[in-house]
Image (cartoon, rainbow, N blue to C red):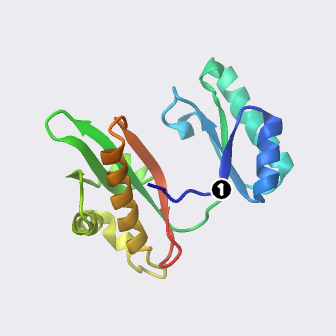
């Protein structure tokens, strides 16, 4: 069950990060990879729109130095270097285990909005295409996915497809206890997410 991902790679060293970025092409993002730190932005572990090798090297070192300064350097597994995706709407898709119902799939606005607005809906897996359609339309932030005040609409079909794929993935791989895709960037129609 393949999920759409931007090009990228995991890097343990500053040289690896620069090499991956050069291979991908610019601009790129550099994000802290850590199994201990959940919210990377809280430790300034995300750098966006890096335009060249020097900026990538600097971002890696700044993330590493910040963690060292905070006494958390051991929490750094490395960084993830990915192609920069601009525009679109930030969404979240997640999975959690309910003791009574099993896997639940969640959908809502992403980034920091999921925590502030708590505009998330849940369904018991497995879901159907109809469930995915209803989930997308049930959040209060749905208007942000439609054409609104000069902003293009989002690729709703791609969002629904991704919801369906994630739900199917957790059904087929029951070892997945929890999953958090945030942000999922929903691009304009025909461009996916």
Q: Callout 1: 10 Å neighbours few (<14), some, many (20+)? A: some
User: Residue at 65% across / 25% down in the picture?
Assistant: 67
Residue 164 found in image quarter: bottom left
User: Residue at 63% across / 28% down in the picture?
Assistant: 77
Q: Residue furthest right?
A: 54
Image position, residue 117 (x, y; %) = 32, 52
Nearest the viewer among 127 and 45 is: 127
- What kind of element bears circle 1? loop
Image position, residue 80 (x, y; %) = 65, 42
Nearest the viewer among 98 and 72 is: 98
- If the image is split into quadrants, where does the N terminus sit? bottom left
Residue 97 found in image quarter: top left
Residue 100 placement, left or right of 193: left
Answer yes or no: is residue 3 visible: yes
Q: Residue furthest front?
A: 172
Image position, residue 87 (x, y; %) = 56, 68
Answer yes or no: is residue 70 visible: no
Residue 105 placement, left or right of 10: left
Residue of label 1: 7
77 is higher (above) or lower (below) than 83: above
Nearest the viewer among 166 and 140 is: 166
Residue 55 placement, left or right of 112: right
User: Residue at 69% across / 34% down in the picture?
Assistant: 63
Residue 37 placement, left or right of 118: right
Image position, residue 68 (x, y; %) = 69, 21
177 is higher (above) or lower (below) than 160: above
Residue 146 found in image quarter: bottom left
**Tally of numbered tags:** 1
């Amino acid at each position: 069950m393949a999920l759409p991902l931007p090009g990228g790679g995991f890097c343990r060293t500053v040289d690896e990060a620069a090499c991956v970025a050069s291979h991908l092409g610019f601009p790129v993002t550099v994000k802290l990879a850590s199994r201990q730190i959940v919210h990377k932005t809280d430790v300034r572990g995300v750098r966006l729109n890096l335009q060249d090798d020097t900026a990538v090297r600097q971002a890696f070192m700044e993330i590493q130095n910040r963690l060292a300064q905070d006494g958390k350097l051991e929490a750094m597994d490395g960084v993830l270097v990915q192609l920069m995706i601009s525009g679109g709407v930030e969404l979240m898709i997640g999975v959690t285990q309910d003791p009574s119902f099993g896997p639940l799939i969640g959908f809502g606005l992403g980034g920091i909005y999921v925590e502030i607005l708590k505009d998330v809906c849940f369904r018991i897996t497995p879901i159907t295409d109809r469930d995915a359609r209803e989930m997308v339309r049930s959040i209060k932030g749905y208007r942000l996915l439609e054409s609104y005040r000069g902003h293009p609409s989002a690729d709703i079909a791609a969002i629904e497809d991704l919801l369906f794929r994630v739900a199917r993935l957790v059904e087929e791989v029951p070892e997945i206890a929890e999953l958090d895709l945030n942000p999922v960037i929903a691009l304009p129609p025909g461009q996916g997410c």
